[in-house]
C-alpha cells in the first residue's frame, strides 16, 4: 500500500494549486458525513483560491507564518 500512496502523492503534487485544492476537497469530503459543513468549507476554499489567484491577498512562506504566530504567543 505504501507504494500506491507514494505514487498517488507524487502525481498529486504535479497538479496545479487549484487542482490540488479541488482534489483535497474531494478527499476530505469522503471522510465527512455532514454535507452542510462540507459545502461551507468548499465555498470558503473556492473564495480563498479566488482571492489568491486574483491577487487580492498575498501568500507568505509557512516558515514566516509560523514565526509570526510564535512571536504573537510570547
Image: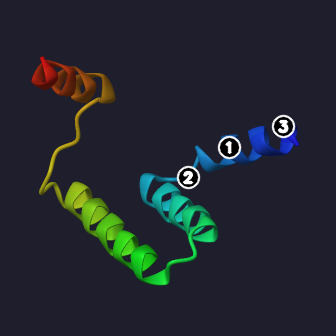
Mark linked to residue 26: none
Mark 3 neighbour density, 10 Å: few (under 14) some (14–19) many (20 or more): few
- At 48% from the left and 53% from the top, the residue drawn is 16
Residue 72, horizontal then vertical, whole percent? 11, 25
Residue at 86% across / 38% down in the picture? Answer: 3
Q: Decide which of 4, 41 is in the foreground and name it.
A: 41
Q: Quadrant of residue 31?
A: bottom right
Residue at left offset 41%, top offset 83%: 36
| CB contact under 8 Å: marks 2 and 1 | no
Left or right side of 69 for 63? right
User: Which mark is drawn over residue 2?
Assistant: 3
3D distance between C-alphas at marks 2 and 3: 20 Å
Determine whether, in the image, residue 55 is placed left or right of residue 35. left
Whole-angstrom CA distance, mark 2 to mark 1, is 10 Å
- Observer-side mark, 3 or 1, equals 3
- Who is closer to the viewer here, 49 or 74? 74
The N terminus: image quadrant: top right
The image's colouring method is rainbow
Q: Which residue is mark 1?
A: 9
Please tell me which of labels 2 and 3 falls first in the chain. 3
Q: Is residue 60 above or below residue 14?
A: above
**Numbered disc 3: secondary structure:** helix
Residue 10 vs residue 2: left or right? left
Q: Which residue is mark 2?
A: 15
| Marked residue nearer the N-terminal end (3 or 1) | 3
From the viewer's side, name the closer residue of 56 and 26.
26
On the rendered structure, is 49 left or right of 25? left
Amino acid at each position: 500500500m505504501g507504494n500506491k500512496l507514494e505514487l498517488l502523492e507524487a502525481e498529486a503534487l504535479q497538479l496545479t494549486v487549484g487542482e490540488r485544492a479541488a482534489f483535497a476537497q474531494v478527499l476530505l469530503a469522503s471522510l465527512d458525513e455532514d454535507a452542510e459543513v462540507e459545502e461551507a468549507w468548499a465555498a470558503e476554499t473556492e473564495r480563498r483560491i479566488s482571492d489568491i489567484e486574483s491577487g487580492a491577498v498575498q501568500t507568505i512562506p509557512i516558515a514566516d507564518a509560523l514565526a509570526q504566530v510564535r512571536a504573537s504567543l510570547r
